[in-house]
Image (spheres, grey):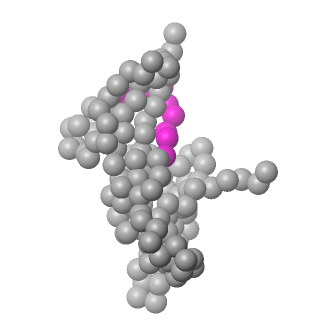
């Protein structure tokens, strides 16, 4: 199978790219703009893989049958060490980030919390405890 890359439908590509840079360290590697110079698409490198952002109106222009498609209908998972999750959770609280879920310890051995991205996507940080 070829590489599978997520493309997230967002309201504002610039705002969303800034969010993923802050919380995932993702760097913009490519963009496309409309006639007014507004970013309508971006590709980001998250370190272990890439993902894309597309403005909702640009998505609808490509796929008119999906005009009712809402931004934010996804959950991205960032896997890391449990200690990193706990430190990032504290940083999120210190910055008054919009939490989708507080820090929890799951019954399947992970420490997790989730943020809500500007377009409503859930960004879940999950880490296994090192024994």
Which residues, given as a range, are shown in magenta?
76-87
- Give above or below for 106 relative to 42: above
Residue 11 x/y as whole percent:
37, 69
Which residue appears farthest toward the bottom when viewing the image? Answer: 35
The answer to whether residue 107 is above or below residue 63 is above
Percent from the top left, x then y, of residue 123? Answer: 41, 45
Residue at horizontal 23%, vertical 37%? 93
The location of residue 65, given as percent across then percent down, is 55, 77
In the image shown, does 9 or 40 lie closer to the viewer?
A: 9
- Is residue 123 placed above or below 10 in the rendered structure? above
Regarding residue 96, the answer to whether it shows in the image is: yes
Q: Is residue 70 left or right of residue 7?
A: left
Which is nearer the eye, 36 or 76? 76
35 w.r.t. 71: above or below? below
Q: Is residue 28 visible?
A: no
Residue at 54% x, 80% y: name it.
64
- x and y, in percent, of residue 100 in the image: 31, 42
Quarter of image, res 5: bottom right
Extreme-right residue of the structure: 1
């Amino acid at each position: 199978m070829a590489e599978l890359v997520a493309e997230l439908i967002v309201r504002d590509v610039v705002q969303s790219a800034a969010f993923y840079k802050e919380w995932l360290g993702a760097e913009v590697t490519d963009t496309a703009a409309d006639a007014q110079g507004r970013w309508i698409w971006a590709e980001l490198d998250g370190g272990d893989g890439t993902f894309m952002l597309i403005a909702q109106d640009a998505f609808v222009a490509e796929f008119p049958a999906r005009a009712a498609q809402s931004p934010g209908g996804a959950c991205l998972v960032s896997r890391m060490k449990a200690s990193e999750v706990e430190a990032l959770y504290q940083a999120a609280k210190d910055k008054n980030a919009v939490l989708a879920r507080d820090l929890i310890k799951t019954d399947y051995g992970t420490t997790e919390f989730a943020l809500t991205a500007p377009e409503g996507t859930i960004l879940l940080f999950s880490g296994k405890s090192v024994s």
